[in-house]
Amino acid sequence: MLKFYHAPWSRSSGILWLLEELGAEYEMIEIDIRQDGGVPEDYRLIQPNKKVPAIEHDGVVITERAAITIHLADAFPEAGLAPPIGDPMRGPCLSMLVYCDAVFDPALSAKAQGWTYESNDFPFGLAEDMVNHLDRILTERLYAAGDRFTAADVQLGSGIGYTMDNLKVLPERPSFRAYMDRLSDRPANIRAAELDKQMAMNTPYFQKQFGAAPSEA
Ligand SMILES: N[C@@H](CCC(=O)N[C@@H](CS)C(=O)NCC(=O)O)C(=O)O
């Protein structure tokens, strides 16, 4: 039994895409992270900071995107998104997954907040170094961990897509654009994006921003 705690158009959207890539059966539990008064306190029993995503798989709760991604990709090996131990792509795949949360996300969050700091002030270092690193990787390789799509691409692709095209805090680089083009026609990506959009348009926060839900328009 797999439960998925999700809010549309959020950091849990990458896990939605991953679940679609894996062909996993899951029960979705929507957490409205933008509701007036904040996320209800009882959700803290699942996620200590009341954030999404979280999953509960066969009675065990797993939090943090990188951990969830590794767990799910390993749990559904038939999808081939987790290079197994011994595969030379496993190391790069794990490195990129953790890099997305430990470096990419905080460095860009700091940049979006206009922070100025030295590289060694924070463990995530400078956004500029991170951008150059990813540019190098995605110029050398087709995908995050090598020449084939892995679970790391779901997190890296979600992060690049959101920060380059929506938040506009990640500078546009030809390697990033070519990478996003490679990911954009994946059926699971398209399915997840459509599902997420429908869910978003049914939440009061986005209805206020964009008008009524399509069905009520
Ligand atoms: N370190 C967490 C971060 C998750 C996170 O930041 N989630 C945001 C969604 S974009 C959230 O739930 N925010 C709601 C809140 O802080 O109230 C992870 O990687 O799973």
Image: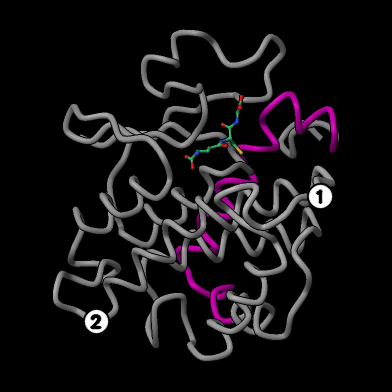
Q: Provide the secondary structure element on which disc 2 rests.
A: loop
Q: Amino acid at mark 2?
A: Pro
> At 45% from the left edge and 16% from the top edge, which residue is drawn?
43
In the rendered image of this protein, does residue 19 appear above or below residue 185?
above
Q: Residue 116: give its label.
A: 1
Judge whether residue 184 is colored magenta: yes
- Circle on res. 141: none
Q: Is residue 35 magenta?
A: no
Q: Is mark 2 within 8 Å of ligand 1?
A: no
Q: Of residues 183 and 117, which is closer to you in this image?
A: 117
Corner quadrant of residue 208: top right
Where is the N terminus found, in terms of image quarters?
A: top left
Residue that mark 2 sits on: 88
Q: Quadrant of the C terminus?
A: top right
Q: Which residues are magenta?
A: 182-210
Residue visible at 46% across and 68% down in the picture: 153
